[in-house]
C-alpha cells in the first residue's frame, strides 16, 4: 500500500469541556523554558484519554505533546507523571518511544505534574483505520504481526541495561495483581454495578506462579502505537507508559487481549472495540496467544486465567473511571454508559469460568 503522509496522520481536535488548560500559566511556563521560541499559544486535545490526558501544544512552528493526569484526581500515586517520564526517558536508546522534552512539577502552572515530549507524526489506529485508508488482508496481517513483534520485543528488553531494574517489586506479581485489582474494585464500587465477588474468588483460587519477570506495558493496544505514514504496517513508536512496570509477561498479554475484539464477536463485546483488530488479516485471540508462546518458547496448557484476569482488570479500570463521573469529578458523557459495559464484562468472565478446565 502507498499513501500520502499528510492524509492519515493522527490529528488533535477541540479541547473537551471541563478539560481546558490554564493557557496563561502554560504560556508563561513555555516562555521561561523556551525563551527563543515565539508565537501565540495553541492548545488542542487528542481523542481518548480516559485516564491521563493528551494535548498538542504549539507556539509558532514548534509543537509538543503535553500529558497530564485527569481532572478530579489528587493522588499522585494513581497518575504518577514523573514515573512515566522517567520510564520513557530510560527507554530512549532501547525501544521506539517519543523523545522526552521537559517535566514540570510546579503546581502553579496547571495544578498538577505534567510533561512535554516530542510529537511523532504518524498514524494511530484507533477504533477504525483513518477514513480512506484501506489495508489488504495481507497488509492487515503484516500490521498485526508487526505490532505483536513490538509487544514481544518489549518483554525481552534488558531491564538492567535500560536502568529499570528497580521499577517493580520482584516475584509475587500475579498475587499482587489479583489482590490489588480486587481491592480497587471494592473501593470504587457504586450501587449500579455487579459485585464481581465470584470472579474475584475464582481468580484468587486459580492464580498460577509468575511465568517470569520482565518489562511490561500494561496497556499495549493498537491505539497506543504510532505507524509510519509511508508504510502503515511499520510501528515507529509506542505511547502511554503510565502503567508500565516489571511483571509477568502473560498477565500483560491478558491485559492486551481484553481489548482484542474479533470481527465475529457478539454485539456486546463489539462495544469495547478501540482498535482495528476486526479487519481482514488480523489474528484471533487464540492465534495471538499461540504466536506469542511460540515466539517466546512458552509452554502453556490454558490461557483461561489470564483471559479472565484481563477482562476483570478492564472492568475495574472502567469502574474507577465511572466512579469519577458518578461523583461529578468529570463531566465526560462517554463514561455515563460504563455500568452497562461493566455488567457485561462480569457475565463474560463468569461464562469463561464455567467453561474453564482449571
Image (cartoon, rainbow, N blue to C red):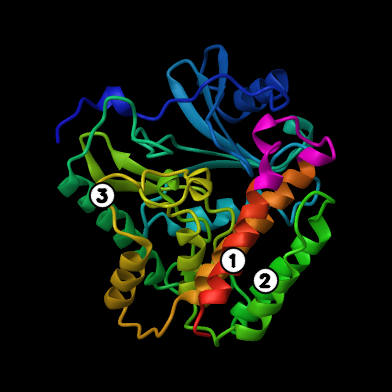
Q: Quadrant of the N terminus?
A: top left
Residue 20 shown left or right of residue 282 in the figure: right
Residue 217 shown left or right of residue 173 in the figure: left
Q: Nearer the viewer, mark 2 or mark 3?
A: 2
Q: Regarding mark 1 in the picture, which secondary structure is present there?
A: helix
Q: Which residue is mark 3?
A: 143
Q: Which residue is mark 1?
A: 349
Residue 59's tag is none
Which one is earlier in the sequence, the residue at label 2 or at label 3?
A: 3
Relative depth, front residue between 144 and 85: 144
In reply to whether residue 46 is colored magenta, the answer given is no
Q: Nearer the viewer, mark 3 or mark 1?
A: 1
7 to 103, vertically: above or below: above
Residue 317 location (% of width, % of height): 66, 54
Q: Residues within 10 Å of mark 2 (few under 14, many from 20)?
A: some
Separation of marks 3 and 1 at Cα, in angstroms? 29 Å
Residue 9 location (% of width, % of height): 34, 29
In reply to whether residue 338 is colored magenta, the answer given is yes
Task: Give me the residue at 38% from left, 63% from top.
Answer: 285
Which one is earlier in the sequence, the residue at label 2 or at label 1?
A: 2
Q: Quadrant of residue 54?
A: top right
The segment highlighted magenta reads 325-340
Separation of marks 2 and 3 at Cα, in angstroms? 34 Å
Whether residue 85 is visible: yes
Q: Residues within 10 Å of mark 1 (few under 14, many from 20)?
A: many
Amino acid at each position: 500500500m502507498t499513501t500520502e503522509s499528510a492524509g492519515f496522520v493522527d490529528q488533535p481536535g477541540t479541547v473537551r469541556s471541563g478539560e481546558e488548560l490554564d493557557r496563561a500559566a502554560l504560556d508563561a511556563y513555555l516562555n521561561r523554558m523556551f525563551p527563543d521560541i515565539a508565537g501565540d499559544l495553541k492548545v488542542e486535545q487528542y481523542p481518548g484519554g480516559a485516564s491521563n490526558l493528551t494535548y498538542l501544544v504549539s507556539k509558532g512552528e514548534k509543537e509538543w505533546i503535553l500529558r497530564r493526569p485527569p481532572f478530579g484526581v489528587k493522588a499522585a500515586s494513581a497518575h504518577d507523571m514523573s514515573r512515566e517520564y522517567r520510564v520513557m526517558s530510560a527507554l530512549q536508546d532501547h525501544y521506539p518511544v517519543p523523545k522526552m522534552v521537559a517535566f514540570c512539577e510546579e503546581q502553579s502552572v496547571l495544578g498538577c505534574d505534567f510533561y512535554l515530549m516530542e510529537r511523532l507524526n504518524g498514524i494511530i489506529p484507533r477504533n477504525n483505520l483513518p477514513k480512506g485508508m484501506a489495508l489488504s488482508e495481507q497488509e492487515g496481517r503484516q500490521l498485526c504481526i508487526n505490532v505483536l513483534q513490538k509487544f514481544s520485543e518489549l518483554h525481552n528488553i534488558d531491564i538492567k541495561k535500560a536502568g529499570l531494574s528497580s521499577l517493580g517489586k520482584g516475584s509475587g506479581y500475579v498475587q499482587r495483581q489479583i489482590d490489588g485489582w480486587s481491592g480497587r474494585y471494592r473501593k470504587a464500587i457504586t450501587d449500579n454495578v455487579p459485585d464481581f465477588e465470584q470472579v474475584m474468588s475464582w481468580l484468587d483460587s486459580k492464580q498460577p506462579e509468575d511465568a517470569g519477570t520482565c518489562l511490561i506495558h500494561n496497556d499495549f493496544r493498537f491505539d497506543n502505537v504510532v505507524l509510519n505514514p509511508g508504510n502503515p504496517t511499520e510501528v515507529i513508536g509506542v505511547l502511554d507508559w503510565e502503567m508500565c512496570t516489571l511483571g509477568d509477561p502473560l498477565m500483560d498479554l491478558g491485559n492486551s487481549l481484553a481489548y482484542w475484539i474479533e470481527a465475529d464477536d457478539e454485539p456486546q463485546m463489539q462495544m469495547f472495540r478501540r482498535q482495528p483488530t476486526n479487519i481482514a488479516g488480523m489474528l484471533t485471540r487464540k492465534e495471538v496467544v499461540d504466536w506469542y508462546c511460540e515466539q517466546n518458547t512458552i509452554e502453556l496448557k490454558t490461557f483461561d486465567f489470564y483471559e479472565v484476569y484481563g477482562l476483570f482488570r478492564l472492568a475495574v479500570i472502567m469502574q474507577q473511571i465511572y466512579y469519577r463521573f458518578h461523583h461529578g469529578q468529570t463531566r465526560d458523557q462517554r463514561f455515563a454508559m460504563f455500568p452497562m459495559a461493566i455488567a457485561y464484562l462480569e457475565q463474560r468472565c463468569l461464562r469463561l469460568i464455567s467453561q474453564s478446565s482449571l
